Structure formats: structure tokens, C-alpha cells
Image: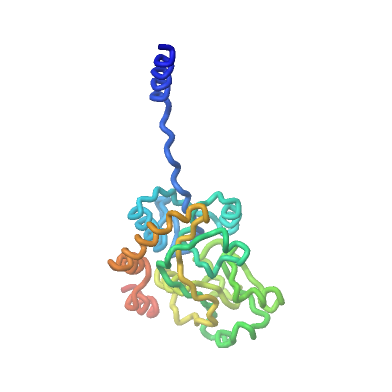
């Protein structure tokens, strides 16, 4: 009888305890338009954000989306306080850190170039021949193609926290060049009505594919994530989301003419 009474009381006590709910995974990235940014309603948007939201929804994975400055995010990744970085490339991960993470199949290809003023002959100079050049870049970002030049002092950098300020630095001649993703250049040139004829693309810095990066301990999520990405690719959903944010050829032509279309 005592045993039965104990079991009844234990069950009754358990029924009144709050149910322990599984915490959502923390999915983070730095902000870089048009891939990840916060809109006027304080909501994260962008190509990568929308793709990741759809991927996790389709894979039935509960996530919390956040954004951090590049330096802070790297510290949090090192401390494993972030579960997922949803706009990463294996090319950007150091050899020492590579074993800490697993990567999904790619969902988007990106290219990064140096951009110069249109009349600057340095735009035709190879990276290994650049001298006395100041490059504008987002604070906390690194470009392996520039590492040697920065270490030798042939190139210096001027950092800014705002991606929209990069072309302004270049237009105001505060820097000789800016390091920028091609899609970001097109986005800024179009949305801010900057005449692309004022600038010229220089040396290639990087060509990468964006993937979803997870801490190793979450590797079991990869099959569902990969299946969702491949399904979205097959249905044309990845391209549709990209096209919703990035300018078409006709839109870029309008911006190039310095007029709204």
C-alpha cells in the first residue's frame, strides 16, 4: 500500500511540473546585404536568411535566428555558443577550425572582387603586384588572398561596420579599393542609384559557395538539411529567393544610366 501511495503521489507531482521543452538551435550570421540584414521592423531578412528559414521549416528543425558583428560571432563560435552559421563557406574556415564543423551542400555561389574608381589604373594590376594601396572592407572580415600583402605592408585596410559605406569610401577617395561580393556591389549600385560606370571591377579575391555550417555535435541534422536544400534547388525555389533580392540585368542597366525605371 505504501508503495502504491508513493507511486500515485509521484505521478501527481510530475503532472504539475512544467514540461521541459527542447530549446531551439541558435542560427546566426553577420549582416551583409543583400544576404542578411535587419529591416525597418527589426526582422532579419535577405537571400540567405529566407533560404535558411525555408530549409529549416522544411526539415522540421526549430531554430532561433540572430545576427552579430563578425568579431563577436567568431568568439561565440569558438565558445560553441552558436549552433549554426547559415551563410558560411568551407573556404573561409581556417585549417585549425575545420574539424569543429560540418557543412551542408551549397545553396548559393558568390564571388568577391576588389573594386576601384573607374579611372584608376590599379584595377588592372594583379593582387601580388599591388603596392601602397588602402582597401576598404567590413570590420572583422578576412580575405586570404590579401593576407600576404597585408602582412608585408604593401596593402593596408580601412574597416567600416556598414556595408553601404564601402562605395562611399571609394567615391570619396578615402580608399583606393574596396573588397566586396559581386552581388553586394550590384545590390548597392542599384538600390542606392550609384552609377556603376564610376567604378571598375579589379582582381578576384575569392570564389566560394555558401552553405549552412553546423557544430560537429549537430551533424545528425545534415541529412534533413541537405534534402531540403536539394529539393528547393530542384523546384527552383533557391533561384526564386535570390531573384527577389538581387537586381536583374535590366534593373542594373537602369541604375547604370543614373535613372529610375
In the picture, measured across the screen, residue 11 lies left or right of residue 144, that is left
Q: Nearer the viewer, residue 18 or 251?
A: 18
Q: Is residue 57 above or below residue 200?
A: above
Quarter where residue 245 is shown: bottom left
- Residue drawn at x 52%, y 56% is 216
Q: From what the image shows, is residue 117 above or below residue 85?
A: below
The part of the image, by quadrant, that contains residue 178 is: bottom right
Q: Position of residue 114 (x, y in %)?
A: 54, 78
Above/below status of 84 relative to 230: above
Quarter of the rendering occupied by the C terminus: bottom left
Looking at the image, which is closer to me, 102 or 115? Answer: 102
* x and y, in percent, of residue 199 in the image: 49, 80
**Residue 211 in sight in this render:** yes
Indicate whether 162 appears above or below 190: above
Q: From the viewer's perspective, tell me whether residue 237 is left or right of residue 71.
A: left
Furthest-top residue in view? 1
- Give the camera-side residue of 23 and 73: 23
Amino acid at each position: 500500500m505504501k508503495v502504491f501511495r508513493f507511486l500515485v503521489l509521484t505521478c501527481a507531482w510530475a503532472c504539475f511540473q512544467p514540461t521541459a521543452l527542447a530549446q531551439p538551435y541558435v542560427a546566426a550570421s553577420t549582416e551583409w546585404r543583400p544576404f542578411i540584414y535587419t529591416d525597418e521592423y527589426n526582422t532579419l531578412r535577405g537571400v540567405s536568411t529566407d533560404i535558411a528559414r525555408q530549409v529549416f521549416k522544411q526539415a522540421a528543425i526549430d531554430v532561433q535566428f540572430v545576427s552579430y558583428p563578425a568579431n563577436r560571432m567568431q568568439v561565440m563560435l569558438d565558445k560553441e555558443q552558436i549552433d549554426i552559421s547559415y551563410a558560411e563557406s568551407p573556404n573561409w574556415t581556417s585549417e585549425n577550425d575545420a574539424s569543429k564543423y560540418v557543412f551542408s551542400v551549397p545553396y548559393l555561389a558568390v564571388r568577391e572582387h576588389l573594386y576601384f574608381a573607374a579611372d584608376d589604373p590599379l584595377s588592372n594590376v594583379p593582387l601580388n603586384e599591388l603596392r601602397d594601396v588602402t582597401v576598404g572592407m567590413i570590420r572583422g572580415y578576412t580575405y586570404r588572398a590579401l593576407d600576404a600583402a597585408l602582412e608585408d605592408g604593401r596593402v593596408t585596410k580601412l574597416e567600416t561596420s556598414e556595408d553601404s559605406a564601402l562605395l562611399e569610401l571609394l567615391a570619396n577617395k578615402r580608399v583606393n579599393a574596396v573588397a566586396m561580393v559581386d552581388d553586394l556591389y550590384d545590390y548597392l549600385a542599384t538600390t542606392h542609384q550609384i552609377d556603376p560606370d564610376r567604378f571598375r571591377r579589379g582582381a578576384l579575391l575569392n570564389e566560394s559557395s555558401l552553405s549552412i555550417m553546423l557544430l560537429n555535435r549537430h551533424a545528425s541534422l545534415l541529412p534533413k538539411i541537405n534534402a531540403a536544400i536539394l529539393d528547393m534547388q530542384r523546384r527552383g525555389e533557391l533561384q526564386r529567393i535570390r531573384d527577389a533580392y538581387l537586381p536583374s540585368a535590366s534593373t542594373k542597366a537602369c541604375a547604370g544610366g543614373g535613372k529610375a525605371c
